[in-house]
């Protein structure tokens, strides 16, 4: 099959023939249909994320189950799935305490780039190729632990299903699950990329009263406005003053930093009102640091929160977001930008880094790549309603 190989930092992706081993016990082979072009994969290119090489990246994907082996829950061949890059065991300390995105069982193999048994399913001419984020879906097919597959309705277009697998869950989840934004709240979102735009969607569906988007790109801010931002600000030296003027001089109730830049994280602290929340959902470079003055936190009682994968329960949240899309309440089709063939992956990242368009999508069917037709909203649109924080599912056995 074809896959996009990254052989080391500061090198381009190279689309080549690779070998994919059959699924082992508890594993699933997925025929890829769509993969989002996410900045997290680019961190591998810059070296900001450390990982064994050579590897196949790609972690925001959707496709069709093609083969299974052993116990794989209720999955079956032909199911449409969004891929979950943070699988959970259901039995460790974090899973038992309703924090499956922090599951410790999968942490070591994911960072090692292997499956649970310490081996890989990818190779080329006998040489091992590593998997990124348990998925490695910049490829025509991938073999993954069954916990990485979450079934979604077949009516959901594959590009939308792919975005549910990362950007949407990270952004919407940071609002609903992590910050638990209240109706009428004032919200600021630094960064209008895939995660930031999804955060704006989440704030809108949570009923936030004022949603302020901040970015360096007018094009991105135009997307933010369309997705529910009430105010759009170009980043500037006096951005905190501008935010305060829009929030009764106090600052916002909740501020989201969706880029992962330490200086923006520090601005987020200043942009929040006393007693407010600051949520970091962007991925900062490994080894970077952010200056968070303890005196400010103490005297102003501000709360700084990390949000990893939107504090998600993928088995619950993926189907929820898919349902909200199909009802027309979560217009995820507006996040989908230009579509690229796998061979155009370097062009896709050039566009991402230049801030061009919405979320780029790698597609694997020639008709999808050629049509470039817009994806329409869900067929059951019936107006916006506030979404309450969903309950945590019961712990499960794997």
Image (cartoon, grey):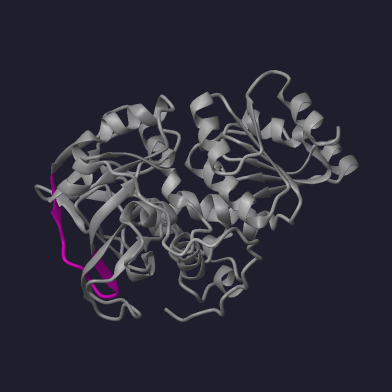
Q: Is residue 67 left or right of residue 313?
A: left
Which residue shows up at 49% across the image and 37% down it? 193
Q: Position of residue 206 (x, y in %)?
A: 66, 56
Give residue 236's position: percent from left, percent from top.
66, 19
Whether 28 is among the magenta residues is: yes
* Vertical comparison of 208 with 286: above or below: below
* 217 relative to 112, above or below: above
The part of the chain drawn in magenta is 17-29
Left or right? Give the position of 368 relative to 38: left
Q: Position of residue 137 (x, y in %)?
A: 28, 51
* Residue 252 shown in magenta: no
Residue 133 seen in the figure:
no
Residue at image location 31% in from the left, 56% down from the top: 158
Viewer-proximal residue among 80 and 83: 80
Residue 352 relative to residue 30: left or right = right
The answer to whether 213 is drawn above or below residue 366 in the figure is: above
Snapshot quadrant of residue 347: top left
């Amino acid at each position: 099959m074809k896959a996009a190989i990254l052989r080391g930092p500061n090198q381009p992706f190279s689309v080549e023939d690779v070998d994919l081993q059959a699924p082992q016990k508890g594993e699933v082979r997925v025929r890829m249909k769509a993969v989002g072009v996410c900045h997290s994969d680019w961190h591998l290119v810059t070296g900001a994320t450390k990982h064994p090489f050579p590897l196949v990246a790609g972690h925001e994907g959707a496709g069709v189950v093609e083969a299974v082996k052993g116990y794989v829950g209720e999955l079956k061949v032909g199911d449409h799935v969004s891929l979950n890059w943070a699988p959970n065991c259901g039995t460790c300390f974090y899973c038992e305490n309703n924090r499956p995105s922090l599951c410790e069982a999968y942490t070591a193999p994911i960072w090692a780039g292997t499956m649970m048994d310490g081996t890989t399913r990818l190779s080329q001419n006998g040489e091992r190729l590593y998997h990124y984020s348990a998925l490695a879906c910049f490829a025509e097919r991938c073999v993954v632990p069954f916990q990485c597959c979450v079934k979604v309705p077949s009516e959901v277009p594959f590009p939308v299903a792919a975005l549910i697998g990362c950007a949407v869950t990270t952004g919407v989840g940071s609002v609903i699950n992590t910050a638990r934004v209240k109706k009428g709240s004032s919200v600021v979102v630094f960064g209008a990329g895939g995660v930031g735009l999804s955060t704006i969607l989440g704030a809108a569906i949570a009923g936030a009263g004022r949603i302020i988007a901040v970015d360096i790109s007018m094009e991105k801010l135009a997307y933010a406005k369309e997705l529910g931002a009430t105010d759009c600000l170009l980043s500037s030296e006096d951005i905190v003053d501008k935010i305060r003027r829009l929030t009764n001089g106090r600052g916002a109730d909740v501020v989201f930093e969706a880029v992962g830049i330490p200086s923006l994280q520090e601005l987020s602290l200043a942009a929040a009102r006393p007693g407010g929340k600051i949520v970091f959902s962007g991925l900062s470079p490994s080894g970077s640091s952010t200056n968070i003055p303890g005196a400010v936190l103490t005297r102003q009682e501000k709360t700084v929160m990390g949000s990893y994968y939107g504090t998600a329960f993928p088995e619950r949240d993926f189907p929820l977001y898919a349902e909200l899309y199909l009802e027309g309440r979560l217009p995820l089709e507006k996040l989908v930008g230009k579509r690229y063939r796998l061979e155009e992956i370097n062009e896709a990242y050039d566009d991402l880094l230049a801030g061009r368009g919405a979320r780029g999508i790698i597609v694997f069917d020639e008709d999808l790549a050629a049509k470039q037709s817009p994806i329409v909203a869900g067929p059951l649109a019936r107006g916006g309603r506030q979404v309450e924080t969903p309950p945590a599912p019961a712990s499960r056995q794997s």
